[in-house]
Amino acid sequence: MKKTLTWKQLAPEGVSAKKEAVFTGAALAASGLWSLTVLRRMATEWDIVAPSAAQGKVVSLIGWQAMLGTALFGFYFIAIAMAILAMWHYVKIKKSAASGQDDIHIRAMAMPALGVILALCLSMILYFAYRAAYLDYRERIEEMFNSAYHAIHG
């Protein structure tokens, strides 16, 4: 017979796994919103660079790492916070004599491991999505510059 886990089995005694899941979800959502700063930086640079490129003038673009900036740091902070949460869970379990030894690692690591996995997966997905948007942005600027340059210089 297949054994299923309940919310109570996913955290130490006296800790709500549901609340941890809600807080982790809220932190992931906030990190996702913070990551949109990449798009704001791209739009700002577009407003500065596009008029010059449309005139066939040579422009300097911000590099990818500078454009990315701190956009994904929220996800990395969540991953670090999840490691700290796992340590706190182990301390909480050690103080509680009621926990059985058979499920100690599940209780300590379930929610933190899920948080780390989600944070790192979302950061990777957003990294590649933003990188694709950045490359498309650079191509559009280059096409704009080339068409204007060839129109001016024949």
Image (spheres, grey):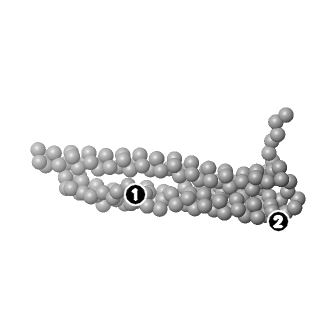
Quadrant housing residue 90: bottom right
Q: The residue under label 1 is which amino acid type?
A: Gln
Front-most of residues 95 and 81 = 95
Q: How many marks?
A: 2
Residue 26 numbered mark, or none: none
Count residues near mark 1 (Cα–Cα under 10 Å), then give few for <14, some for 14-19, many for 20+.
Answer: few
| Left or right: residue 104 compared with residue 46 | right
Residue 66: % across, % down = 39, 60
Q: Residue furthest top?
A: 1
Front of the two marks 2 and 1: 2
Residue 95 numbered mark, or none: 2
Q: Is residue 18 visible?
A: no
Q: The residue under label 2 is which amino acid type?
A: Lys
User: For the C terminus, which image quadrant?
Assistant: top left
At 27% from the left edge and 48% from the top edge, which residue is drawn? 142
| Left or right: residue 36 compared with residue 50 | right
At 24% from the left edge and 57% from the top edge, which residue is drawn? 59
Q: Is residue 20 visible?
A: yes
Residue 82: % across, % down = 65, 59
Cα distance between the residues tagged 2 and 1: 45 Å
Q: Which residue is denoted by mark 1 in the rendering?
A: 65
